Image (cartoon, rainbow, N blue to C red):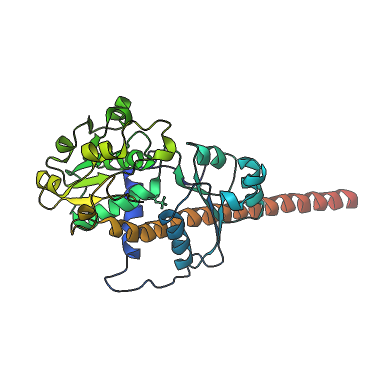
Amino acid sequence: MPTGLLGIEELSRGEVEAILHRARTFQPLQHQSYKKLDTLRGRMIVNLFFEASTRTRTSFEIAAKRLGADTVSITASGSSVSKGESLVDTLNTLAAMRPDAIVMRHAASGAPYFLAHHLAIPIVNAGDGTHEHPTQALLDALTILDHKPALEGLRVAIIGDIAHSRVARSNVHLLAKFGVDIVLCGPATLLPPELSAIATGVTLTNDIREAIEGADVIMMLRVQLERQHDPPLQAGEYFHFYGLRLDHMALAKPDAIVMHPGPINRGRELTSEVADFQQSVILNQVENGVAVRMAVLERVVGAHVEAARQKSGAVRESDKTERGMRTRSFGLGRDVLKS
Ligand code: CP
């Protein structure tokens, strides 16, 4: 059974709540700086990023350090993958140095799942292709809960390049566990109809105004040009139909918040006025990334250390039993020899 955190889909609602509850204890009070803890002192976390990242990689590193762990960060260009080494060989090489967890981002959907089935070291998925980005959905949920009393009963509009978005998928899996009314919106070419079936409470629309109508949360997504062979709309056309402008906010609930996982592209996905609007919580999301990743690392490494402790305890017990059996058989042998 793989350990670590691979996706939101396989977590129960209780597990999500437990992570969010723990993350809340790591959120610093206003104007207060983080205190360094020693929960993971002596532990080693490897950050292995095969795709670019600012927020996720930095916040995992900060989270690990704030828990007292040591960290090593490796990027694709700085690893032997650039010399032709396979992903499996790279992971086996890192695993041989016995880190306590590997945080991994990869362009191939499912890559961390495949590796987690073959390695005893816990893997934390920091984004796999178009599949999942579990810690992003957790930090998004924490941010929503900083502004709303509960997730239940909210209407959340997720707008943009849904087809290529691991952020959208992880958020849908998480929000659906809490009965959220989820509206996915984008151009038809970036909004596969099958997405309405991935969880309960999901509806699809190609009309941004319809998506925003009555929304409590508006979550904008980046257009992932690196995953599009032939972008369906020019940048200007895309912004005209799917860019969030300040006048759209009148359609949402008066206290609606605007979110974006980043990196944001001003003038493509949203205007600067919206990005810097007082109801924009984009930098709160970034801040919550550290608290959520602290909770995730503590949980994942803690579970791994506990499992190893129990295993070594069981090995010691079986050693004792085996030694006892050997002692008894020597005794029996001596007794037999004596008689
Ligand atoms: N939201 C997110 O995953 O950002 P990065 O690509 O900068 O990590």
Residue 189 placement, left or right of 336: left
Residue 242 placement, left or right of 317: left
Residue 240 placement, left or right of 101: left
Q: Is residue 1 visible?
A: no
Given residues 252 and 135, the one toward you in this image is 252
Given residues 336 and 30, the one toward you in this image is 30
Residue 247 placement, left or right of 293: left
Residue name at image x 59 percent, y 46 percent: 120
Percent x, y for residue 46?
A: 55, 56
Percent x, y for residue 45?
A: 54, 58
Percent x, y for residue 24?
A: 31, 61
Residue 281 vs 6, above or below: the answer is below
Percent x, y for residue 83?
A: 67, 45
Residue name at image x 52 percent, y 39 percent: 111
Residue 133 falls in which quadrant of the image? top left
Given residues 51 and 200, the one toward you in this image is 51
Q: Is residue 158 visible?
A: yes
Given the current orientation, which residue lies at the most extreme top position?
Answer: 193
Given residues 175 and 247, the one toward you in this image is 247
Count the labels in the image.
0
